[in-house]
Image (cartoon, grey):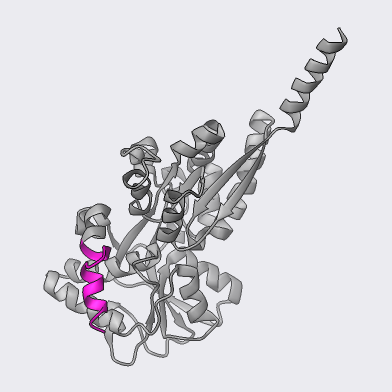
């Protein structure tokens, strides 16, 4: 009887005090969003199941982060700003299935953003659209497209603007070459580029995600910077996935899946809006339509044939970016 009591207490203690850990490996500019989201999910999961979850975060340039997971960083979930940086988990490590984008709505992208311009108060260089970025006296700040999803979106947004305006591939390559000739420094990630522009005072215009612009203005005040929306830009989708190999190893697949599912909930989408990410849930998107400027947005699939082809053509070693940048 005494032995049975001890066994019962041991089982009870395990169920009460057991804590599940999750590691979310993400990109540079999501720190603040996931800080709030994680707290909301922990509360939701505790109320639903009684289980306590501890969520750890890792942030950096998106491609560097993805490579870290391939190289052994045991992420339970990966939350990126482009599908290409999740595809490599299948291509290089078979950590996830090839069709991972089919597992959640909107191609597994619960939120989106777009590339916009942040200029200094008063817009002293009168930057209004893409063409202004290649003027001789304008210094754009863009992170390195080889290491940063933010940088890749900026590059593709510039290229796509030329195409959508009636130009061909030759004109687009010439334009993007002139653009990067004006870039004084290539930081490895979006947050580093923000530091260069905001704290070091380098450059005339920062190309970055819409949500990052809002964060900068909220932190530093509207009296230092202004946002400029170009006539067209790119839809920056933010895909997510569980990392199957590691959730199975950690035995936390249920919790990791619930963590991603909750991004699509009303609360998850409202938190996204508070951090100036464009929601994908129609009820929330309709409610907040006035909060996001409506401009002509094109997709990577539409202009570039998808991320796989865009990566191979533009950002792989010896690709178009290497060709134009080595000539600088």
- The outermost residue toward the front is 71
Q: Start and end of the magenta stretch?
A: 313-328
Residue 192 position (above or below residue 267): below
Quadrant for residue 207, please give it. Answer: bottom left
Residue 254 shown left or right of residue 188 in the figure = right
Q: Position of residue 139 (x, y in %)?
A: 37, 86
Instruction: Work out which quarter of the rendered image holds the C terminus and state it.
Output: bottom left
Residue 154 position (above or below residue 288): below
Q: Position of residue 77 (x, y in %)?
A: 49, 44
Residue 101 shown left or right of residue 51 in the figure = left
Q: Position of residue 253 (x, y in %)?
A: 52, 33
Residue drawn at (72%, 26%) of the image: 15
Residue drawn at (53%, 45%) of the image: 268
The reply to whether residue 40 is in sight is yes
- The outermost residue toward the bottom is 137
Q: Is residue 318 magenta?
A: yes
- The outermost residue toward the right is 2
Residue drawn at (29%, 71%) of the image: 231
In the rendered picture of this protein, how many numbered marks are placed on residues?
Answer: 0
Q: Is residue 36 magenta?
A: no
The reply to whether residue 167 is in sight is no
Residue 9 position (above or below residue 266): above
Q: Position of residue 40 (x, y in %)?
A: 63, 45
Instruction: Work out which quarter of the rendered image holds the N terminus and state it.
Output: top right
Residue drawn at (58%, 49%) of the image: 37
Quadrant for residue 307, please give it. Answer: bottom left
Residue nearer the viewer, 96 or 112: 96
């Amino acid at each position: 009887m005494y032995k049975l009591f001890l066994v019962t207490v041991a089982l009870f203690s395990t169920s009460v005090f057991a804590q599940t850990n999750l590691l979310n490996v993400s990109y540079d500019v999501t720190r603040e969003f996931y800080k709030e989201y994680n707290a909301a999910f922990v509360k939701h999961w505790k109320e639903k199941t009684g289980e306590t979850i501890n969520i750890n975060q890792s942030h950096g340039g998106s491609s560097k982060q993805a490579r870290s997971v391939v190289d052994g960083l045991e992420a339970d979930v990966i939350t990126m700003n482009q599908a290409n940086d999740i595809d490599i988990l299948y291509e290089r490590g078979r950590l996830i299935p090839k069709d991972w984008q089919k597992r959640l709505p909107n191609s597994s992208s619960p939120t989106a953003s777009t590339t916009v311009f942040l200029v200094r108060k008063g817009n002293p260089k009168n930057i209004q659209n893409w063409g202004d970025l290649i003027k001789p006296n304008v210094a754009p700040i863009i992170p390195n497209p080889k290491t940063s999803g933010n940088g890749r979106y900026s590059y593709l947004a510039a290229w796509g603007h030329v195409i959508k305006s009636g130009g061909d591939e030759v004109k687009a390559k010439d334009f993007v070459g002139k653009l990067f000739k004006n870039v004084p420094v290539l930081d490895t990630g979006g947050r580093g580029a923000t530091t260069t522009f905001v704290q070091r005072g380098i450059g005339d215009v920062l190309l970055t995600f819409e949500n990052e612009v809002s964060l900068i203005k909220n932190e530093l005040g509207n009296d230092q910077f202004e946002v400029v929306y170009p006539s067209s830009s790119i839809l920056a989708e933010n895909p997510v996935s569980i990392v199957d190999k590691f959730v199975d190893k950690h035995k936390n697949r249920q919790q990791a899946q619930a963590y991603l599912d909750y991004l699509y909930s009303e609360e998850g989408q409202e938190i996204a809006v508070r951090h100036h990410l464009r929601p994908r849930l129609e009820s929330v998107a309709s409610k907040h339509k006035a909060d996001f400027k409506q401009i002509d947005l094109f997709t990577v699939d539409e202009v570039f044939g998808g991320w796989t082809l865009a990566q191979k053509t533009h950002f792989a070693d010896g690709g178009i970016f290497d060709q134009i940048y080595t000539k600088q």
